[in-house]
Image (cartoon, helix red, strand yellow):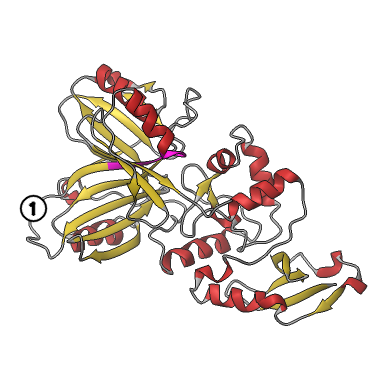
Amino acid sequence: MTDVARFASPLGPMMATVRDGRLRALRFTEGWSAARFAAAEVRPARDPAGIVSRLKRYFDGELDAIADVEVELDGTAFQRRVWNALRRIPTGETFSYAQLARAIGHPEAVRAVGAANGANPICIVIPCHRVIGADGRLTGYAGGLDRKRWLLAHEARAGSLFCIDDDGGMQLEGVEIAVADVEADAAAYRVLLGVAPLTGRDGRRRFQLSRGAVELAPGAGRHAIRFRTDPGDPPWPADDAFHGVCVRVADAAPPVDGDREADAVETIDHVVVRTPDADRAIRLWRDRCGLRLALDRVFPERGVRLVFFRSGGITLEFAAAHPAETTDGPDAFHGVSYRVPDLAVRRERLLQAGVDVSAIRPGMRPGTSVATVRSGTAGVATLLLQVHGPPA
């Protein structure tokens, strides 16, 4: 016997079907009904197996209320593998389709993963809304992009360190690193990232990742943060408005290069800027530039205030001393954190190549491990990071 519950949610009416205490389907009700079940198999219910109560707690901000909901999955073995992997994406995090394909051991099956994601019968509990485009933009969602945007923002507001961008506007594209010897530093970054560079104008080398890019520029200039804009976006502030940080407008990203190691860096996770004035950073990047403020938190034990903005699927982090010693002075580009699929494997490969890498340690963000790269980075502070989902 299948219990069917119809209930209201902040995103509109929903329907859940439960059999033997396991959730079988959860959908927004337009275009879907319990008619797929024979009449004799269905009975109305208010809160079967407590599913409706758990979802209401989720919508009220208790995000882990649905973490251990038992589900019953039909579908092919491949679809079930994708759906189980979706449940291992941490709340507040997002994956690209390519990342999800790699997570299930089929990096070549990006289209099939996308199709399985779209066929997910249990929305929210199996969080297909956490899968986005490689460039950080929202992509298709059976419930509509407005609902997808709401869900991601809800999970960010309720305690995650991160949130997702709105479509359009300034998009963080990557970093530009000024180097004295392009050939030597490109060879070092080839080892660090596990990605072959593309040769660009003026002898530049570009390392295109699944999300974000690192560009090495010849000369003794300053390191820069690269953004891209869309036609019709508001004009940027003048260069002197960025308080000493070099900001450049990037060209459209080329396709990801095919010459990549199996354990290569996947994405830029965050770019770090040192600032004497965190409030000044908020006034500029949120209020003037329109970036989404994802975190503003003081960590007394570390003597630091961290302000995170989210753009292009990448976090722009501003770190300020707390209590502030001064609010005068320029901001300064500090470093980059890269996400890897397997930190232990990547670290061992770097050590074998003669790169100085610290021991692996727990990251500040729950569910992460990190290691510091101390050579071969052209002097840029560099961190490797792995996000661990719940056990499979």
Give the percent coordinates (x, y) of residue 352: 35, 24
Position of 194 relative to 327 (above/below) = above
Q: Nearer the viewer, residue 306 or 29?
A: 306
Image-quadrant location for residue 182: top left
Q: Which residues are magenta?
A: 336-343
Q: Nearer the viewer, residue 214 or 204?
A: 214
Query: In the image, is 125 to the left or to the right of 380?
Result: right
Query: In the image, is 144 to the left or to the right of 379?
Result: right
Query: In the image, is 293 to the left or to the right of 36?
Result: left
Residue found 82% across the figure and 69% down from its top: 34
Position of 145 relative to 269 (above/below) = below
Mark 1: amino acid:
Gly
Magenta run includes residue 379: no
Q: Dot 1, how many residues are within 10 Å of its Cα: few (below 14), some (14-19), or many (20+)?
A: few
Count of numbered labels shown in the rendering? 1
Magenta run includes residue 338: yes
Instruction: Farthest residue to the bottom: give it.
Output: 46
Residue found 76% across the figure and 81% down from its top: 45
Residue, disc 1: 329
Give the percent coordinates (x, y) of residue 270: 33, 47
Give the percent coordinates (x, y) of residue 129: 57, 56
Q: Quadrant of the N terminus?
A: bottom right
Give the percent coordinates (x, y) of residue 269: 37, 45
